[in-house]
Amino acid sequence: MRKAWGARPAVTGGRERVLAVVPGRQGRRSPDPGERRLAVVSARQPAAPVGRDSIVSLARTQLASGSSVLIVGPPGIGKSTVVNALADGSIAGRVLRAAAAEVESGLPYLTLVDLFGAALTEQGSLLPGHLRAALDAALLRTVAPHTPQDELAVRLAVLELVRILAAQSPVLMVIDDLQWVDEPSAGVLHFVARRLAGLPVQVLAAERAETGPVRAQLCPEPYLELPLGPLSRDDVADLLRDRFGPGLSPATVARVHAASGGNPLFAVELGRAVAERGEPTAELEPLPVPDRLRSLLSARLAALSPSAGVALTVLAAAARPTVELLERCGIDAGADLAEAVAAGLVTGGTDGSLAFSHPMLREMLYADADPGNRHAAHERLAAALDDPVERARHLAVIRPDPNEALASTLVDAAAVARRRGAPVVAADLARLAAQRTPDPARAADRCLAAARHAFVGGLTEEAERLAHDALRDAADPVTRIGARLLLVDLAGQDMSGTGPIVDAAFQEAEESGVLTARVRLCRVRKAFYDGDSEYMLAELKRAEQAAEQVSDIECLVEVLAWRGHLERTFQVLGAEDLLERAATLSRGLPLSSAGVTARQMAALARMQRGEVAEAVRRIEELRVAVERAGTVRDLASVLTALASVYSRAGRWADALAAGHYCLRLFSDVAPGAPGPGLLVAALVELGGGTVEQAAVYAEQALAASLAAGDEDWLKGAYAVQGQILLVRGDPVGAVEPMRRSYALEQRRGPSDPSQFLWHADFVEALALAGHRDEAAEVLNEITAQVRRLERDVVQLGLARAAALCTALGGHPREAAQDLTDALHIWADHPYPFELARAWHVLAGIERRAHRRGAAREALLEAIGRYTACGAAPWRAAAEAELARLDGARTGGLSDSERRIVELVRQGATNREIARATYLSVKAVEANLTRLYRRFGVRTRDQLAKILDDG
């Protein structure tokens, strides 16, 4: 093969609906209360906001239990007020706060600045140097690095910083307006949230959402989702009375409630207008309603001086407004904002920061500001700011027409954003650069650059749109070919529709004489998808020649890697030398996907030769390099290899961690085609997790690969599905998916049995299901292939399968001797798990030979080896067999159970057993049910047989 939670049961009570969210992924438990329980709620609590008593009480209970809380609702419903009340009542050792806004959402890592800026100053010395440097750069504390910013290092740095803070005292992160959190910060917070199990860290957040949250993944599980509903009429009356006194009549309060729809912000603003202008004199005299709230705000602002209006517009347009920034913009913050502060529009922090008293005020003011004032505000900010990313965004707003100088500035800003690890921001800036570029040809080039940034940032639809735009407008064949190659990359696992794109790229490359090697390499990948090995070999040789002619070393590296990988399957002399040459060449180049592919293939070849320690060393080294480079797509590929080498090394716990990480990355970077990540997750769950979760992932991997038409990963998904059924004791069910896998493998051409160890299980399933002739045929075919390719590491597994076939053929003692001999020969097998599997099968064969003592010894050996490997599902299966072995015909059965079993062997019915044992029929049925469960069987015949075998 080549290089996926949260159920929300609703509970309704009173006026507010509460959704309890718990982890939905099987195998992931919630922390025990003692692990994360925090005393985050002070004994003396601030009063709850009007009408929110029950919501606040539930949230405080949740916070006290160690869980997180997410407040959701529409604009103005009071989310920020509830969050502030909860945060003010917290006695967590450290409270970290951030409040995002739409105007800031395009600025990378701004939320991280708000959350961790002070903490980094205090605790940054405790971070490893490279992590501190990455986080400093992301938070704008140092000059942007000249090499690509390691996005993963930023994530790891924040995670490490949180762990440092949590080791000192409980941590509460308060984040208002999750929907406006910038994408780079959101990615980091999502990364951290998944890794907080057992730590005294919680999140208290609010998100604007009409139908449900979209950023819930930023909250660590378990969390409580609290949708805020409208206030009742009585609650609105209390709210207006608290703000404006008892002067408003009940009729007016009722109208305000009706007009506001129970929205607290709307109600307060409506109440303010009524209090200032007087109550309506007639019932039909209209009140301001929510859709006229902007006019109400304009009326309030109109009372301010012109200088205050200008200052507020600049304040609304700024990403991180401060007194100093406004003064650099030529605004006297103290004088010009005094009226706004007195009117309750603006608040100031002790550190000089400025903010609107409610986020909605900022959004509304900015939207309703005079276009000229908005233009002037952005112009002032562009002149005052030093940061190239922020400055470029303001310039783009004030200069909408084509302008090459501005376009160049935006290109430079995009490069800075990319180096900071913010490809989404880089994509937006590059897109703006393309729009501002007067020359259509150069605009197309920049559009392709934007598409590539978007692709790296996981914006698949945006990248595809931009690539098509570049292809449409490009004059340079390099741009057109590059756009087509990117479109092929964007296809991901499903390359079924890429043929015409590849053909068009090849035709233009041939005509123009540019990028020929890269296009041929793309044709190789398409041929791999199609399963055409012979065409691949021929095209690889032509691609190699083309790459050498133009000295495209990066392309040559990948070509050599593919050649070596494929020719190993054909046992071509020197194939492994090609792999090593490619890996060596790649080390002299900047890290790229081609170099990652070459080094990964060479390492896996070592693993398949049995050099497991060397393979682990190489892949671990490659992982470090890829993480430093921040290439997430490459990391996803490397993690597939890492999970494989860890499993071969008998390190299932490490394989499980790598596999889960791999799945998360594939889900992030290829949400439409996560089949590879799902299959890797299924494999590691089967080895070191749970069979149940493995089955879930395998089914999803199968569906994803079928949808993508990807036969390479599809054959793996079928094989794993069969292995799971075999482990579950259903060899008959296992046969069909394994047959499909084998048929695909045969049709796609020569394969290497050492790449994925499943053929021995296929033979076992066939033999156990009664298809002994077919089992013998498959065993002979695979054995011949293993000998031809000299894949000795597979031989122990085949010896295991052959011994089982012999035992099922009526010669268990001969089979036991054969497998014992094989275990002696392969006592130092490089794959510890394979040794454990062989001992496990030997135990079953010895039991068939009625040698219980030998069977018990073999099972104990298997259990010990499974334990050493961390192979939990297999250890559990072996322990269950040992319990059955020790319990059969011994004190493992009670007297009544033993009597029932004897009557079952004699063929007695339940009623006959009841009469003979003086039990009721229901008691007999209950005893049999317990016995079925204990011995893992479903029928009376199976129960009798397993006890007889014991």
Image: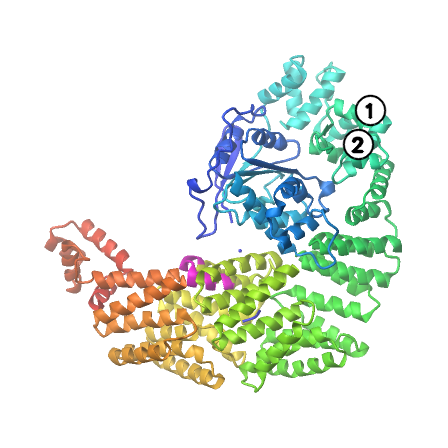
Report x, y in % for residue 322. Answer: 76, 35
Query: What label sits on residue 94 in the rendered view?
Result: none
Can you see residue 677?
A: yes
User: Mainly helix, strand or loop, the magenta region?
Assistant: helix
Q: Amino acid at mark 2?
A: Leu
Say whether residue 691 is left or right of residue 179: left
What residue is at 55 percent from the left and 47 percent from the top?
A: 193
Q: CA distance from mark 1 to mark 2?
A: 10 Å
**Residue pictured at 26% horizontal, 81% vertical:** 814
Compare marks 1 and 2 and give the one earlier in the sequence.
1
**Amino acid type, residue under disc 1 in the picture:** Leu
User: Count of labels shown?
Assistant: 2
Which span of residues is magenta-colored? 679-693
Q: Please identify the residue farthest to the front as the structure is shown.
A: 125
Res. 430 image quadrant: bottom right
For label 2, count other residues whose C-alpha is less than 10 Å away and answer few (under 14), some (14-19) or many (20+).
Answer: many
Q: Return the mark for residue 304.
A: 1
Say left or right for 908 vs 754.
left
43 in relation to 869, above or below: above
Q: Are marks 1 and 2 in contact (CB under 8 Å)?
A: yes
- Please say whether residue 496 is visible from this viewpoint: no
Residue 591 picture location, percent across and down: 67, 67
Decide which of 266, 366 is in the foreground and name it. 366
Q: Residues within 10 Å of mark 1 (few under 14, many from 20)?
A: some
Examine the rendered structure and indicate whether residue 739 appears above or below residue 60. below
Q: At x 64% / y 78%, what residue is drawn?
A: 560
Q: Is residue 564 magenta?
A: no
Question: Which numbered tag is attached to residue 312?
Answer: 2
